[in-house]
Image (cartoon, grey):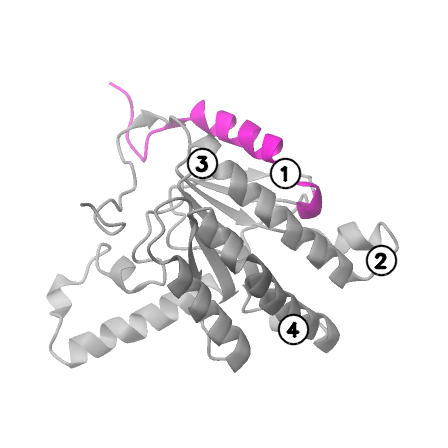
Amino acid sequence: MKTDTDIRDNRAGEGVAQGPRHVAIIMDGNGRWAQARGRPRLFGHHAGARRVREVVECCPGLGIRYLTIFAFSTENWKRTQTEVAGLMSLFRRYISKEMKALAAKNVRVRFIGDRVRLDRKLIDLMDALELETEENTGTQLTIALNYGGRDEVARATKRLARDVSDGKLDPADVDEETLPKYLDTCVLPDPDLVVRTSGEARISNFLLWQSAYAEYEFIDTLWPDFTAKELEILCQNYGARDRRFGTVKT
């Protein structure tokens, strides 16, 4: 039986895409969605959390096996203490509420990011959700929490350097295939499609290494308004693209 590691590839040379199997989403616009309704930013974050369920549930029908969502970045600690505390409370509530439902729907959940700054209760819930769903074979949901692409590469490099120092790895053998084995996403294929909602056209330190050959969609929809139908259209657009990975047709 093939593992996730066995099927890791970048689809080089496949040409016209058939539809993304791995979609990564920068879920942006919760605060603006709430402010447009005269509500506090946390109201928007709660609405955004509810939207996650619909998107996860639609993945099998769209042929999406892997879904990675950007929940909280290493830079988000700069927000107000009230908003950060509210978000951490939301994450704990979301995991507690959704754990059984995700397990029942055969969803496998993983978390990526640095857990050092997270509180013990949240870490315990993350561990419990990963354990509860580790045997599931359906949609592979990865939640990036206290995640930053540069931070991930720095942490991976430290682990790699440690193996070199311990004599487990020859520096001469280090190449672009080596570092991904040390990344948080080492058991996942690279994303085929990266979507950012809310009209912002930047990647915000998300999956920097992994997205080298991803297709990007920057859309105006605020995350709480994002629908399964809109994701379906984005997948159709992806399927019409010619992905050459640096080559040319002969």
Q: Quadrant of residue 179?
A: bottom left
Q: Residues within 10 Å of mark 1 (few under 14, many from 20)?
A: some
Q: Quadrant of residue 40?
A: bottom right
Residue for point 38% across, 47% down:
212
Outermost residue toward the right? Answer: 38
Give the quarter of the figure containing the N terminus: top left
Which region is colored magenta? 222-250
Q: CA distance from mark 3 to mark 1?
A: 22 Å
Instruction: Reply yes or no: does residue 64 show up in magenta.
Output: no
Q: Which mark is residue 78?
A: 4
Instruction: Reply yes or no: does residue 234 show up in magenta.
Output: yes
Q: Which mark is residue 39?
A: 2
Give the quarter of the figure containing the C terminus: top left
The image shows a total of numbered marks equal to 4
**Which of the two discs, 2 and 4, labels the residue nearer the N terminus?**
2
Q: Residues within 10 Å of mark 2 (few under 14, many from 20)?
A: few
Query: Which residue position holds label 3?
Result: 60
In the image, is residue 250 above or below residue 26? above
**Amino acid type assigned to the residue bearing label 1 in the image:** Ile
Q: Position of residue 38 (x, y in %)?
A: 88, 55
Residue for point 20% across, 46% down:
2
In the image, is residue 55 above or below residue 134? above
Q: Residues within 10 Å of mark 4 (few under 14, many from 20)?
A: few
Q: Secondary structure at mark 1?
A: loop
Confirm or deny contact between disc 2 and disc 4 (CB under 8 A). no
Q: CA distance from mark 2 to mark 4?
A: 21 Å
Query: Which residue position holds label 1?
Result: 219
Confirm or deny contact between disc 1 and disc 2 (CB under 8 A). no
Residue for point 11% across, 65% down:
172
Q: Secondary structure at mark 4?
A: helix
Q: Position of residue 166 (x, y in %)?
A: 15, 81
**Which of the two discs, 1 and 2, labels the residue nearer the N terminus?**
2
